[in-house]
Image (spheres, grey):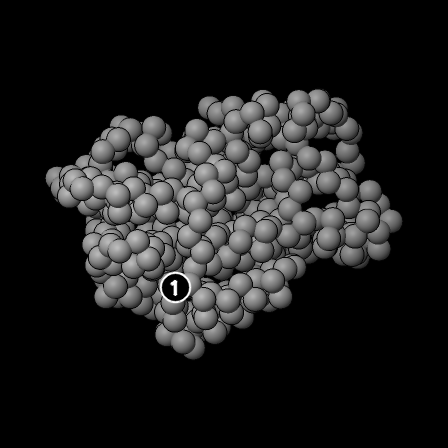
Amino acid sequence: MVIVGSGFAGYHTAKSLARRTRGEIEIVVVSPTNYFLYLPLLPEVAGGILEPRRIAVALSDTLPPCVRHAPGEVDAIDLEAREIGWLDPEGVAHRTSYDRLVLAAGSVHKVMPVPGVNEYAVGFRGVPEAFYLRDHIVRQIDLAAMSDDPEEVAARCTFVVVGAGYTGTEVAAQGQLFTRALARSRGLDPEAMRWVLVSRGRVLAGLDEHLSRTADAVLRRRGVEVHTDTTMDEAAADGVLLSSGERIPTRTLLWCVGVRVDPLIEDLDIEIDGGRVVVEPTLQVPGRPELYACGDAAAVPDPSRPGEATPMTAQHAVRQGTLAGRNIAASLGYGTVRGYRHRDLGFVVDLGGLEAAAAPLNIPLTGLAAKVVARGYHLAAMPGNRLRTATDWLIEAVQPRQSAQLGLVRSPAVPLDTASPEVPQHHLGFPHATTRS
């Protein structure tokens, strides 16, 4: 059994399949990284609260021995021959046949045709980008503290986030608190730290109205400039131009407008809908009983919204991965097949400090109560590293955040338009890493 991807869907497919078959079959997970990344806490890495390895759970530590990890990027899938090929980190090509194949490759940045965005924006989908952003923020504050030019200081202390979805909202919330703490330690005015959140619609559009309204109010109260019904028309080295006509001088542009499915699946001879693999409620690809897809890569029919596919969220990816494992096991004689169904358990949004918004089982919560629910939810959802993560949270509550700028990841290593945001795009990463069009 071969699984492409070790994100939420791929990881839980492997876990479910191994459990249901009692370790009696061989499972191979092919992915560029040997860990499952708990993406919802990535903004806390960029904000200097958590260390990256806290949210990077090693596959070998949490999956049974029957699951083997093949480090590499898939570059060939032959559906007729039932073979898959990949290149490992040292550029060596590998191929293997499969009896069942699961496409759980996840998603990459959605890049819009905005002048300058590819050159000057950075995305936020992997550890390299979080590492880069944290170092970049510290570097801008350090350079601002040494400058005598008021315009330069203002530009370096201005941070623009485009996209007010889950990621953009939490990054702006965590980043604003981080820069204020940095400013105090460098002798700068914390009030001079300017964060701008640009959104085509409302904050957290598509989520519960309570979450949207609370996040918007918290950000504005803290001084974040929230521009709704606004887009970015142009990006340059010294600033951005908004659709309102306002030009904002800045050295930091974060692109969080959304995601698209991994380009790997675009060349396959299967039905695609909106860039996602069309699947039956059992997560099988029509006409190919040996092929499954789940998570962001799959257009899974949503039973609660007839005619529509499930949203690209972690909750759905976890459930679909678990179901894919169950149904593959059933196809081998272990258990029975089921169709996909779900119950909305609600969402949580961590806004930094003691602020959060949550709606567990449609119960609206804010402030400290929501913060407790949010962190409890994350700890329960993480497959490992819970104690280390909780310890980092405790330390952050009683100690100032560390502000060393290591410079390990530079901007050429985190291009916006890449098929592999999980790994740095330079000679230390995969030698064949290139942009797929």
Rendered location of residue 423, percent (x, y): 55, 35
Rendered location of residue 91, percent (x, y): 66, 22
The residue drawn where x is 34% and y is 35% is: 121
- Tell me where residue 150 sits by quadrant: top left
Amino acid type assigned to the residue bearing label 1 in the image: Gly
The residue drawn where x is 84% and y is 45% is: 25
- Tell me where residue 173 sits by quadrant: bottom left
- Tell me where residue 292 sits by quadrant: top right
> Closest to the observer: 123 or 329?
123
The residue drawn where x is 20% and y is 39% is: 152
> Closest to the observer: 251 or 345?
251
- SS category of the residue bearing label 1: loop
The residue drawn where x is 59% and y is 23% is: 431
Which residue is most to the left?
245
Q: Which residue is mark 1?
A: 352
In this picture, residue 368 sits left or right of residue 77: left
Disc 1: CA contacts within 10 A as few (<14), some (14-19) or many (>=20): many
Q: Is residue 92 visible?
A: yes
